[in-house]
Amino acid sequence: MKKMMKAIGITLLAGSILVACNSDEGTDTSEDPTGEGIPNEQVDESDNEEEESNSGDDENEESNETDSESSGGGMASDLEFNDQLDLGIGDTAQISSNQGAYEITIHSVKREEEVDGETSMFDYMIVVDVTVKNIGDEVIDAYNPIGILDQTDRLESSGSGDFSRDFPSVDEISGDLGPGEEIKGQALFDMYQNEEQFIRISPGLIAAGGVYNEVVWTFTEDEME
């Protein structure tokens, strides 16, 4: 009887050990740096979270690159020019901006009472013969240098922008302009009658940081054709 009870006890003990071993094999673990076991399920989840995090970083980098390209940041000029405030007809200005670097030369200013059957909303119009040259390293929109200009008879007052695109007979400047290339054309402004007149870079663009240096051409009504 005692032998039978002993045999039964040994059998039960062996069964308990076997069950415990099977339980350990069913939960496969990986060791962390501290030597403690980590279930494979937790390791897989950690790897997935890390992959998702890296994927998110890649997407953010791509998004930042796209934003930089769409904003035209790559066209911003690193050239620096002094303010040029005492230019006249025939003079060339060098300008640096967030849309590249270029030169603008004003060759002549012609007074017109009307253009294409339209009269000025002020006193008269002027047609300005200009040359634009790209002195930067990037292709630019040839009209941008004209679009930054305005005309006024008082520097402390607001000015009138270019209207050349609204008049078919005016030789407006347009198209792409590669590095080192230049183009000739015309700008058109409405103006008030006054002895002294100015063409300048719009002060608002200077204040906003779109253009990095100031430029002013001064001329009189006697100098106009």
Image (cartoon, grey):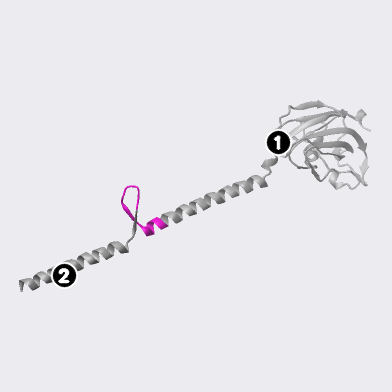
Q: Residue at x 66, y 46 (%)?
A: 69
* Left or right: 109, with 137 as reference point: right
Q: Secondary structure at mark 1?
A: loop
Label 2 secondary element: helix
Q: Give 153 or 109, whichever is nearer the viewer.
A: 109
Residue at point 20%, 68% (across, down):
15
Picture coordinates of residue 13 (x, y %)?
A: 16, 66
Q: Above or below — where is 136 with respect to 11? A: above
Examine the rendering and report whether any part of residue 120 can be seen. yes
Q: Nearer the viewer, mark 1 or mark 2?
A: 2
Vertical placement of 211 versus 171: above or below?
A: above
Marks 1 and 2, Cα distance to the nearest angstrom? 88 Å
Task: Give left or right: position of 66 versus 45.
Answer: right
Contact, mark 1 vs mark 2 (Cβ under 8 Å):
no
In the figure, is residue 22 to the left or right of 98? left
The foreground one among 199 and 76 is 76
Residue 220, percent across and down? 88, 28
Residue type pointed to by label 2: Thr
**Magenta-drawn segment:** 31-44
Q: Quadrant of residue 114?
A: top right
In the rendered image, residue 105, in percent from the top left (x then y), is placed at 84, 33
Identify the mark at residue 11; answer none if there is no mark: 2
